[in-house]
Amino acid sequence: MLTIYNSFSRSKEVFRPIKPGHVGMYVCGMTVYDYCHLGHARVMVVFDMVARWLRASGYAVRYVRNITDIDDKIIRRARESNEPIRALTDRFIAAMHEDADALGVHRPDFEPRATDCVVDMQSLILALENKGLAYIAANGDVCYAVRRFPGYGRLSGKSVDELRAGERVGVVADKNDPLDFVLWKQARDDEPEDAKWDSPWGRGRPGWHIECSAMSSRLLGGHFDIHGGGQDLQFPHHENEIAQSEGASGSRFVNYWMHNGFVRVDDEKMSKSLGNFTTIRDVLGKYDPEVVRFFILRTHYRSPLAYSDVHLDDARQALTRLYNAVRTVTVRETPEIDWSSNWGERFRAAMDEDFNTVEALAVLFDLANEANRGGDTALVGQLRALARVLGLLGRETDAFLRAGAGREDSGLDVAAIETRIAARVAARKARNFAEADRLRAELLAEGIVLEDGADGTGWRRV
């Protein structure tokens, strides 16, 4: 039975979809004014993994991930590059898709652009205005009156008086309260015309928070199962989404809130605002995309993910060990998963425990070790089949190695390799074939292939 850690209740809960057998999931996507960084990669890979597992569990999933293609940063970047906003956002959406495709991330079922849903946003703002939750500020902006919504602060676990304006929430003198946030921004004279829309409140554009409330309800209805995003969005963005959506409808917005942890560099969150980000493209220039995917999945999605070349090098070696273990079963020969087997049951139990990819990968390595010891083709097939649920081991081993993932030094120097070969020769002479096989498998896991011949044992790296 699947359990999910719900950020709203701060506890694991048994997953019970609103409509049996169906799941509606919305994930906050990218603001497209630059290339995606590794923090964005984590969001994409994590919720791709979630969607894959839900589907593998038999659910029909309706997955929506939005694109923010209008905001202050986009306007500023378009001005700097002297191009229309649409040209800028189209360019970076294409780049985002290239990065996601490389990482093996399936496209969401729906990928709405904010600029295509402005009418929906205006309708939602009108509903809030009619409920007395929105007001026109002195500067012409339409703002949400936070203190008029009784439940504000439940997601972040703080009272209104404890909360302070967070990211993208400016303290403006024209507001009634510093925590109030903008629903509709009055057009400014210095802003380009392609950043303005007609509205009941005059020319302007939507605020950031209203975009997701409108897009999610348009495609999933006013009440759906799962809402996901990065941990940094919990407050204020997701808190504000709840206030908007529940304030307008008077009913529950989302059943399960999921937040992935930060990617950290030197114990700081990776972000563009801190200037310590590494783009996905930079990383893929050095590492195979599947290595990057594996690196992300080997840490539980709610835990911090420490980024460094050392960790990526280790991920490359570990993934190479798995690829070497499945060399004898091709992609085409991959069987159906035997969920009744010990391996299938353990893998399912791990994934059903709040998508615990750490334990699921441990099952794969145990299976690889067992397959290496016994040379059981059936076990190798199950290894490849289970890994593919996570979007891994989808290539032939030689293709993966040729792509560069396994061409680096295995980490063993020549002396260490020769020492292990000598130990294996001694084990064979002592007729301790189990130990000899263990040493051979250990070397293979490090990318070292032994070649026994009349002149002794040779070796080569793969």
Image (cartoon, rainbow, N blue to C red):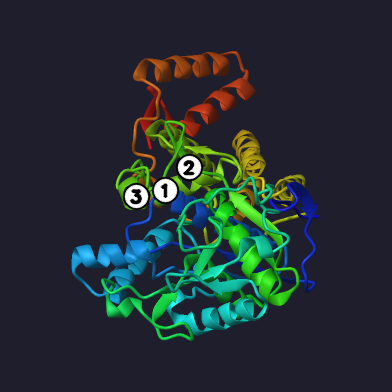
**Distance from Cα at disc 2 to Cα at disc 1:** 7 Å
117 or 287, which is in the foreground?
117
Residue at coordinates 48% horizontally, 28% vertically from top-left? 443
439 or 347, which is in the foreground?
347
Name the residue carrying label 1. Answer: 38
Locate residue 270: give its quadrant. top left
Locate residue 335: give its quadrant. bottom right
Residues under numbered marks 3 and 1 in contact, where contact means CB atoms less than 8 Å apart = yes
Assign the C terminus to one quadrant of the image.
top left
State which tag comes first along the sequence, 3 or 1.
1
Q: Is residue 352 left or right of residue 192?
A: right
Residue 15 at x, y = what percent?
78, 59
Name the residue carrying label 2. Answer: 263
The reply to whether residue 413 is visible in this rendering is yes
75 or 368, which is in the foreground?
75
Q: Secondary structure at mark 1?
A: helix
The reply to whether residue 330 is visible in this rendering is no
Residue at coordinates 47% horizontally, 81% vertically from top-left? 118
Q: Secondary structure at mark 2?
A: strand
State which tag comes first along the sequence, 2 or 1.
1
Residue type of the residue flagged with mark 3: Thr
Residue 310 at x, y = what percent?
41, 31
Q: Which mark is residue 394?
A: none
Residue type of the residue flagged with mark 1: Leu
324 or 265, which is in the foreground?
265
Q: Secondary structure at mark 3?
A: loop
Residue type of the residue flagged with mark 2: Val
